[in-house]
Amino acid sequence: NIPASIEGKQPARLADGEFVIPADVVSGIGNGSTGAGADELYKLLDRVRLARTGSDKQGREIKAEKYLPT
């Protein structure tokens, strides 16, 4: 976990490989609307997951040790 904060006040934690997109960028994607920008980003997530796994849902958690060699 990577410690972070929201506006220096509220603690937040991110995992390695996760990132935060600033609100002004989300708004820019949505042509001035953060809601519309967020909708577009969720569509992006769905398209990537669908292309990679055949489903727009996040993969379920697995027990990795079950599949790793002993």
Image (cartoon, rainbow, N blue to C red):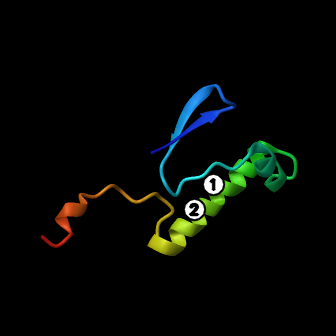
Give me the disc on residue 66. none
Name of the residue lying farthest toward the top: 9
Left or right of 26, for residue 12: left
In the rendered structure, are the residues bearing label 1 and label 2 in contact, judged by CB atoms less than 8 Å apart? yes
Name the quadrant containing residue 48. Answer: bottom right
Name of the residue lying farthest toward the left: 70
- Secondary structure beneath disc 1? helix
Name of the residue lying farthest toward the right: 32
Q: CA distance from mark 1 to mark 2?
A: 6 Å
Left or right of 66, for residue 2: right
Residue at the spot of label 2: 46
Left or right of 52, for residue 36: right
Q: Residues within 10 Å of mark 2 (few under 14, many from 20)?
A: some
Query: What amino acid does circle 2 point to?
Result: Asp
Name the quadrant containing residue 64. Answer: bottom left
Q: Residues within 10 Å of mark 1 (few under 14, many from 20)?
A: few
Decide which of 69, 32 is in the foreground and name it.
Answer: 69
In this rendering, the answer to whether 52 lies above or below 21 is below
Query: In which quadrant of the rendered image does the N terminus lie?
Result: top left
Q: Position of residue 17 (x, y in %)?
A: 52, 58
Give me the disc on residue 42. 1
Residue at 76% in and 43% down: 23
Residue at 51% in and 62% down: 56
